[in-house]
Each structure stands twice: as structure tokens, then as C-alpha cells.
Image (tube, grey):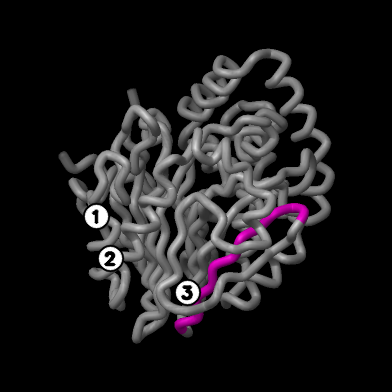
Amino acid sequence: MPRNPIPILVLRGRPFERGGRHGEAFAAEIQRALGRSKDTSSRKAYEAARGRAAHSWPLLEECAPEIAMEVQGLAEGSSSDVTDLYLRIGFEFFVDAAPTGCSGIAIAGPNGAVIGQNWDAPPEDAVDLALVLHAGEAGVETAMVASVGTLGWVGCNRSGLALSTNDLILDAIPCGLPSQVVRRLALDQASVPAAIGALRSLPNMGGRCYLLGDAAGAIAGVEISPSVGVSAMAATSPILHTNHARLPETAVVEDEARLQAVYPSSRSRLAALERLADGARTVADVMAVLRNRDGAPNAISKTPSKEEKTETAFSIVFDCAAAEIHLCAGPPSTGVYQTVRLSDPERRVEPPPRP
């Protein structure tokens, strides 16, 4: 059955004020999420991760002072400890982060790029999702789907730059900038080349793939390893990605045994994308690919299985030239996409009641 739409939160003002509004709107949910994080980790593991987050904080203040102020506002608004919140944002501070597998596609369409992704996570993570719109005097500047109390998973900006991301099991470093910070800094740019430049300039903590597209029709897929750096895939449409390295330079640092334990369906989902994506040109084409159930339950539109407990928590398609988001709560094979335009007029902020 189709699920209720993901709530929309509009944030205005300076970074501290935006964070405060976010924290106030979802204070109860954020407190519950922080409690779950402590309950599911041993005290020793949690304190070790918290120490890594505290060590990273000065780097955040240096590289992204406005984001640091936003996190401080988020802590005040939700009556939370700022280090605990930064630890929620920086899941990489935990040695064994929860799995979030994804299937992504980037196409250079006739009128700008189209970026699509199914974001897979444990079913209990879906209840904490919101679409967060950061608005300035000219309207919405950046839109990101986020777990409440975080900076965001995927998103786009008013210039038409869109970003999606896939987890890769590569090498890692204990201190750097969490990927959610990196994503926000990349979305401060106006084009794919500028975003790649930002990614190259930042201290990435772990393995990750980003698919990028912009209003001019440029697309890119990059794989990131702390030891290898940022490696770009051939910019031939379509660019497809799941949860394993596709470039030889990053594959050499991939943990194949852990990949098979965490994302055993990665290669079969990629094979399904390759069968379906040839000839995809439009938003409707990308939606059709993301709805596919070949190989179910471990399909592009994923549901939980014995091997992988995750399901598609949301599906999203960015129309870069139109600055439009098409967002579906839950697996798109049974859900409905709703359209959000960054140029829409004022919105009321009404987070729905949560159990």
C-alpha cells in the first residue's frame, strides 16, 4: 500500500536559527533517535565514537562554520547534547555503521540531467525521514531528504545541481568530515565540475559513491576512498551504481568479504539497472527503472529479505533543469511519487504527529 507522504520542513533565517527550527519541530523524534543509538551500541563503542566526533568538531568549525552553527542550533532546539547530535550526523564515527544500500542512476536528458535513487535502510529508519527545505530571500536554496536531526542524505539546489549517494565498503579514517557535511558543501556549488572540485578538496572519512547532475545536462559518478582520493567514472549516460566499487583503483581497497555480508545483492541490482536503463531519457523512464522488482525481494525496488534486512525507505528523482523533486515514500513499486518544486511559493510547516 502507498505510504503517507514524507513530511516537509521549511527552514529560514541564519544557520543557527534554521537548526533551532529543525530541532524544535522534531524534538521528540530526535531524542528518541539519540536514545536508540545509545541503546544499540555498547557503552564502550558509543563513547569511543563520541570521542572521534568531539575530535572532528574543530575541523567542522574550520571547514564549514555555518554548518557548525546549524548543528549548534539543532542541539539547542531539540534540547540535545551537540556532540551526541554530531555523532548522529557522522555515522562514520562508529566502526560498524548501520547498512544503507542504494540503487542509483544518472542520465543526461534532452533538457538537463536526471538523477534517480532508491535509498534502502532498515524499515525502522523510514519513520524519521523528512524533506528539509532551506529557504532564503529568493526562495528555496537547497532541498535534502534527511533523517530528522541530521544534515541530509540526498538533495538538490536552486541552481539545478543534484546529488545522490551510495555506500561503499572501502578503507576509512577515524577523523575527517562526515559525509553528510561533505554532501552539503558539494550542494553549495552550482555545477557538476564545481561539486567535484569541492569533493576533492575535503577530508572524506570513508568509502562512498556520489552521482551528480546539473541543469546544463552534465553528469558524473565519483568513487571516494580516503587513501585513493576521488576517482571519476566515465561520464557516459547512463551512469549506474549500487554498493560495490566499479573502478579498479577503488576496488583494490574494497573489503569483499564484508561487502558480501552487508550488500550481497549489490551486483544483481546493478545488473538489473544495466538491463533496464539503456535508452532512459526522461523522469518517467527513471521512475520505471526504480520501480523494477526483478529478483525480488532483493530488487531495485527492495523489500526485506533473509540476506538483507533493508527495504527502499524512499525513492527520489531529481529533474535538474526544472529544479523539481519527485519523491516517493517507501518502495516505488507500490508507492506514488509526489512532486516538489523548489520555485513553489511559501509553504506551511506542519510535521505530522508521530507515534
Q: Secondary structure at mark 1?
A: loop
Magenta span: 217-227
| Mark 2 surroundings: few (<14), some (14-19) or many (≥20) residues within 10 A | some
- Rate crowding at label 1 as few (under 14), some (14 to 19) or many (20 or more) other CA atoms within 10 Å: some
The answer to which of 97 and 71 lies nearer the viewer is 97
The residue closer to the viewer here, 66 or 220, is 220
How many marks do you count on the picture? 3
Report the side of 243 relative to 232 (left or right).
left
What is the secondary structure assignment of the residue under circle 2?
helix
Q: Earlier in the sequence, mark 2 or mark 1?
A: 2
Q: Residue 14: horizontal and vertical position, in percent?
A: 64, 55
Q: Residue at x 63, y 48 (%)?
A: 254
Q: Is residue 174 among what the camera can see?
A: yes
The residue carrying mark 1 is 291
Identify the disc placed on residue 276.
Answer: 2
Q: Quadrant of residue 82?
A: top right
Residue shown at the point (65%, 51%) measured from the top left: 181
Q: Is residue 226 magenta?
A: yes
Amino acid found under the numbered disc labelled 3: Gly
344 sits left or right of 163 in the view: left
Alpha carbon distance from label 1 to label 3: 24 Å
Amino acid type of the residue tagged 2 in the rendering: Leu
As rendered, which of 214 and 73 lies closer to the eye? 214
